[in-house]
Image (cartoon, helix red, strand yellow):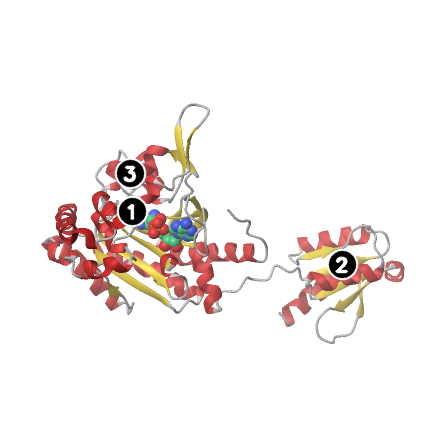
Amino acid sequence: MRDIMAPESARWRAFTQVFADVVEPAGYELVIPPVMEDLGVFTRIGEATDVVTKEMYDFVDKGDRHVALRPEQTASVCRAFAQHRPVVPWKAWYSGPNFRYERPQRGRYRQFDQVGVEVIGVDDPYLDVEVIALGWEFYRRLGLERVSLLVNSLGEPDDRAAYMQALEAHFESAGDALSDQSRATMRKNPLRVLDSQRREDQPIIASAPTIDQFWSTAAAEHFETVRAGLTSLGIPFTVEMKLVRGLDYYRRTIFEYQGATLDSAQNALGGGGRYDGLVEDLGGPATPGVGFALGVDRTLLACDDEGVFPAPSTDVEVFVIDTTGGSAALALTTELRAAGVSADRAFENRSMKAQMKAANRSGARFAVIVGSDEDDAGTASLRPLRGDGEQVAVGRDSLIRELQQRLQEDP
Ligand code: HAM
C-alpha cells in the first residue's frame, strides 16, 4: 500500500474532478459507501472468484461480526439501494479505495482507487450505451488516445448456464492437453478458463464454443441495440466473445476499456456490465443494474505513458518576505488569501537571503517584500520571480489590487 505524495496527489484530486464533470451533468449523484461492510455483501460478487476466495481482507471485529474491506463498490452500491430504496432509475457515481490481497506489481496494488457509476432500476440497452459512452468520454477528457473498448454479452442466466456446460464439456474433452491450473479453474468456473494466458491452453480456447451460439433472442436483441447505439455515437469497439470479466454477477452486456501500454495482465483500465440479479441477491427487489469502475492507479499510469494529464500546479502565486519580525507577513498573507490570492511566507525571521531562496523555491510568481524601509514608508516591494520584470514599490493599500491585476494580465 502506497502513499500518494504531491504533486501526484494533486493529480488524483483533479482526476476525480474531471470524472465528476463528466457524470454529474448526465444526472449521476455522488454516493459514499463505507469502506468496510458485512462480509456477506461481498460474497455475492461470486463464490467462485479469486476476488472473494483469495483476495479479500476479512476479519472478525470486536463485536464478533465477520467484516471485510471492500474489494469493489458495486456490491456496496446495490446493498445501499436495497437499504434506502432511492427513486429509480438511481444514477450514482463514486470514487475511493478498494482492497484486494493480490501480488503487487506495476498497475496492481493491494489498495487501489476506482471511480465508477452504477444505474439501478432500468433494463434498457440505451442505458448500457449511455454508461459505456460516459467512460469513453472520460478517457477522452483525460487526453488518452490509446484506449480500446471490448464488448460482449454473457446472455441471460439460462444462456450463460448452457454455455458454461458446453465449455466444460469442451475443456473436459481436451483431457491432459489443458494445463493443470485451467483444469482446476474449469471445475469452479469454466468461463474463467477463457482468460488463461498459458500457451498450452490457447489452441483449446481457440476451438471452444462461443457465447453467441447460446444467446436467447432477447439477449441477442439487447446486445444488437447496444452495438448499434455505440456505432451511432461514433465510439469504436470490438466484440470480443472471449471477454468474461473476473466477477460472477454479470448478465448480458459486459465491457472493458483496455490500455495499450501496461503488461497484458494489467491492461484493463476499467470495466463493467449488467448485474441484473445482484440487488435481489442482496435482499432487495428484483432490480436491473448496469455500471462500470475505472482503476485510478492504472489509468494514471496510462496517462504517464501517453504523456497526457500532467499534475496541476499547486504552487502559490505570491510569497511574502518580511524582515521586520514576521507580523507584516502575517497580516499580508491573511489579506491576500482572503482576496483569493494564494500566498505563503517564510517563518523564523530568517535573513533576507534565506527568505528569498524560499520564495524562489516556492514556485510563486511574485515576491512581496517588507523590510524596515518599506515598513516606514507604508509600502511593500513587488518583485516578479519569473521573467525580467523590475521590482517596484507599491502602497500597502493598493498592493492587493496591483497583484490581482498583474496575476490576471499574465496568467
Ligand atoms: P474490476 O474489473 O474488478 O471491476 O475492476 C475495475 C478496474 O479496477 C480494473 O479494470 C482495474 O483498472 C482496477 N483494478 C482492479 N484491481 C486492481 C488492483 N489490484 N490494482 C489496481 N487496479 C485495480 C469491478 O470492480 C466492478 N465493480 C466494475 C463494475 C461496476 N461492474 C459493474 N459496475
Residue 1, how many percent across, how many down?
Answer: 50, 46
**Label 2 vs label 1, nearer the camera:** 1
Disc 1 C-beta below 8 A from ligand 1: yes
Q: Say whether residue 154 is left or right of residue 404.
A: left
Rate crowding at label 1 as few (under 14), some (14 to 19) or many (20 or more) other CA atoms within 10 Å. some
Q: Residues within 10 Å of mark 3 (few under 14, many from 20)?
A: some
Report whether residue 117 is seen: no
The residue that mark 1 highlights is 247
Q: Residues within 10 Å of mark 2 (few under 14, many from 20)?
A: many
Q: Which residue is mark 3?
A: 44
Residue kind at label 3, given as amino acid type: Arg
Q: Which mark is residue 320?
A: 2
Location of residue 397 with respect to 47 vertically, above or below: below
Of the 4 image quadrants, the one containing the C terminus is: bottom right
Kind of residue indicated by mark 1: Leu
Assign a secondary structure to mark 2: strand
Instruction: Tell me the amino acid under the disc marked 2.
Output: Val
Q: Residue at x 29, y 44 (%)?
A: 49
